[in-house]
Image (spheres, coloured by chain):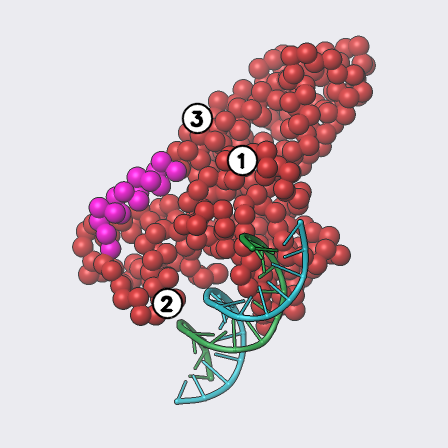
Chain colours: A red, B green, C cyan
Amino acid sequence: MDYSSSWINTSLNLNINPHMVHQQLPKNVVENNFFSLEMKKSSPKEESSGALVEELKRVSAENKKLTGMLTEMCENYNTLRNNLMDYMRKNPDKESSPSKKRKSDEISSSNNNLMGGEVGGVNGNNSESSSSDEDQSCKKSMELETCIKAKVSRVYYKQESSDSSLIVKDGYQWRKYGQKVTRDNPSPRAYFKCSFAPSCTVKKKVQRSVEDPSVVVATYEGEHNHPHPSQVDSTSSATNNRCRNPISSAVPSSAPSTVTIDWTKSKCSNESSSKKMMINHPKMEVPQILVEQMATSLTKDLNFRAALAAAISGKMLHQN
DNA sequence: CGCATTTGACCCGCGC
DNA sequence: GCGCGGGTCAAATGCG
């Protein structure tokens, strides 16, 4: 996921409480409002079944709306990105000598606005200090770069300690190109490159946490210059993804108010989304017990909750 | 047979 | 200048 794309959350008209089902609840307590669904299912059946179905329909509609908004955000991001590329093409940076491979890589990645710096380093500092004699256009492009650059982010995945693999299924296609044992961590660090698009230079480092071996730390460098594979081929990616639980994520300090929408969250709720599709089916005749199971599955899905909470907080931030 | 992964070698930056 | 350590390359290997 392009983390920066979540900034472009323009107008998410989430109608969290369109019906009168939960009107007794304060309007600002959206999470409680939403999660009261779980409480609902314990109410008398004759009363709650219809409300539950309505509620599920509403939740499904909201989820669809969220999905649409995410897609729109990604499209906006790609449009912005293309604009930036055009701009930078019209104001090309000075060509550097390709004598040293890694240096040229760094420079090109900086120009391409795809790569972040080294882990822990806030890139852009070097360019700022060295760009004092550059012309105005270069400065402008640099500023634009620093505005949208996705730098480095870390995602922590909870993983079975017995699972020794360093494979984190986040929806993207990665090709492993190296593995190293680092000094500060006995567990090996795996290096991955994004293989979905040839031009995508996003890299990922995966290593188990020293403190908690059941936690896998994935460090992403750069920004994908292509849409999420699930948007290109949602059916195949849905079957390919193992469900891992990202327990927290950190975004660069340069983007403190970013709402990180992790695609793994949506991927992990495949099961519940398929159920929602069933509910939305026009010829729906779902047994009561199944409805309740669906409701439970939906509301107990932490990933779904997290994604929804992220969208809501994004909306709130936008309103503020 | 083609593709992905593994793994040892090499490169390069950085600290001393 | 040298050694260390992280990162990358590319041949070998495995797998479907």
Amino acid on which disc 3 is placed: Ser
How far across and down, in percent of the image, does residue A107 sit?
33, 60
| A83 part of magenta stretch | yes
- Residue placed under numbered mark 3 in the picture: A11
The residue marked by circle 2 belongs to what chain?
A
Q: Say if labels 1 and 3 share a chain.
A: yes
* Nearest-to-viewer mark from 2 and 3: 2
Which comes before the other along the chain, label 2 or label 3?
3
Question: Label 1 to label 3, Cα distance in Å?
Answer: 26 Å
How far across and down, in percent of the image, does residue A11 sit?
43, 26
Against A9, residue A104 (above or below) is below
Against A263, residue A167 (above or below) is below
Q: Main secondary structure of the magenta part?
A: helix
Picture residue at 65% right of the left edge, 16% below the top: A281
| A111 part of magenta stretch | no
How far across and down, in percent of the image, does residue A12 sit?
47, 26
The residue marked by circle 1 belongs to what chain?
A
Q: Quarter of the image holding residue A56?
A: top right
Q: Say if labels 2 and 3 share a chain.
A: yes
Q: Secondary structure at mark 1?
A: loop
- Residue placed under numbered mark 2 in the picture: A101
- Residue placed under numbered mark 1 in the picture: A233
Question: Label 2 to label 3, Cα distance in Å?
Answer: 44 Å
